[in-house]
Amino acid sequence: MKGNCVFCKIVAGDIPTKKILENKHFIVIKDVNPKVVGHLLIIPKKHVATFLDLSSSLYENLLKTTNKVVKMILEETGSKGYNLLVNNGSVAGQVVHHLHLHVLPRKEGDRFRCGVD
């Protein structure tokens, strides 16, 4: 655990949460402040601050986990599209400095804009 990292505390079980999926390297939880229905977070169990801090093996596992999670949430929500979003560093909007990948299933008219065209 790294200091007062909320995601490290969730991984350690110190903060209760309902895990949507868990494997050797990652947990997947619902975002507590969802931007759209089905908004999930993929969180490495090992504390890494940003995308660039991932080892090559964690990177590979992140892609495999993301693929599985996206398929699952698209089926569950009936969404036809999705956004994957990672904020890296404070200037990019990262609030919790433990890497987490947002999975946002999208539906027509959901009114969410990620700000990138």
Image: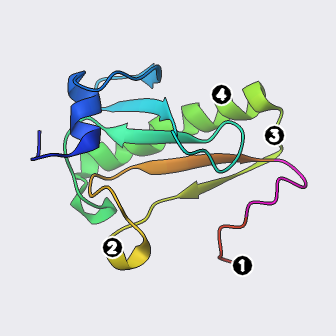
| Mark closer to the observer (4, 2) | 2
In 3D space, how far apart are the residues under numbered discs 4 and 2 (Cα atoms)? 30 Å
Q: Which of marks 2 and 1 is nearer the N terminus?
A: 2
Q: In the displayed image of the protein, which residue is found farthest to the right?
A: 108
Q: Is mark 2 on a helix, strand or loop?
A: helix
Locate residue 40: give its quadrant: top right
Pick the front one: 7 or 27 = 7
Q: Position of residue 29 (x, y in %)?
A: 47, 31
Image marks 4 and 3: residues in contact by CB distance under 8 Å: no
Q: Distance between the residues labelled 4 and 1?
A: 26 Å
Q: Inspect the image, locate mark 4, and give the three-letter code of the amino acid beneath it.
A: Met
Which residue position is annotated with label 2?
90
- 74 with respect to 100 (left or right): right
Query: Circle 4 sits on which residue?
Result: 72
Q: How far is the residue under mark 3 from the one under mark 1?
A: 20 Å
**Is 34 rendered above or below residue 76?**
below
Answer left or right for 91 relative to 104: left
